[in-house]
Amino acid sequence: MKTILEEIQQKNPFLKAQFLRELFSLVEGQSVTVYDLEYNPTQKILRVFICPLEFAEQSKNEGITLEKCIVVDKALSPFLENSSELPSEVVLEVSSPGLERELKYPLHWPRSVNRKIKIKYGTGKLERENLENKLENKKEKKWQQAVVSLQEVLYDENKNEIVSIQVLNEKGIQENIPLENIKKAKWHFEF
């Protein structure tokens, strides 16, 4: 399974691996880890979302303080100023991913077991459609949203990748949802 660094590099191929490794190392030197990173070249904004290292080890202590964000910002600022990877006028934003953080990468799923999540997922449905007087099969996804409790993450041991999640739906029924059918997911926080 890919690391968060590898996932971020795949999403941002214009950011070099060495640059990302150094950035991750600086962040982890502050006793936190990178949850996600977004770079908008047109607006020249680099957003670094952080969470405690314990979160990476599935701890329930996910709190990030404003003070910790400032410490990480101060650690990254000189690095970004001296880097030729990004424009010198890039704006750095450091924050937590929030209470309702998105689950973007496979490693986010195991860290969310026993949490309520809001998912948008599809169910494949084979339909027949009359098109130019001949029948063709058309596969269509019907999207639905639900707030569920994530019970377990299921792996394909041979490929070392997540294949599906087991959830408890709002009716208390256990469902198995293939990861490929999930369009969007995030933590769900009830106020």
Image (spheres, rainbow, N blue to C red):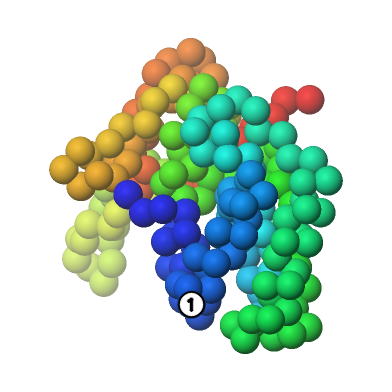
| Frontmost residue, 130 versus 49 | 49
Considering only vertical position in the picture, is 110 above or below 104? above
| Residue type, mark 1 in image | Lys
| Frontmost residue, 41 versus 120 | 41
Considering only vertical position in the picture, is 106 above or below 94? above
Secondary structure under the numbered disc 1 in the rendered image: loop
Q: Residue furthest top?
A: 172
Residue 153 appears in which quarter of the rendering? top left
Q: Residue at x 75, y 69 (%)?
A: 77
Q: Residue at x 74, y 85 (%)?
A: 88
Q: Residue at x 41, y 53 (%)?
A: 3
Indicate the position of residue 89 as horizontal and vertical percent values: 78, 83
Is residue 4 in view?
A: yes
Indicate the position of residue 137 as horizontal and vertical percent values: 22, 57
Q: Residue at x 34, y 28 (%)?
A: 176
Q: Residue furthest front?
A: 29
Indicate the position of residue 114 as horizontal and vertical percent values: 51, 22
| Mark 1 neighbour density, 10 Å: few (under 14) some (14–19) many (20 or more) | few
Is residue 146 in view?
A: no
Question: How many marks can you see?
Answer: 1
Indicate the position of residue 25 as horizontal and vertical percent values: 55, 59
Q: Quadrant of the C terminus?
A: top right
Q: Which residue is mark 1?
A: 16
The answer to whether 29 appears left or right of 114 in the picture is right
| Frontmost residue, 171 versus 13 | 13
Residue 146 appears in which quarter of the rendering? top right
Considering only vertical position in the picture, is 105 above or below 75? above
The answer to whether 176 appears left or right of 88 in the picture is left
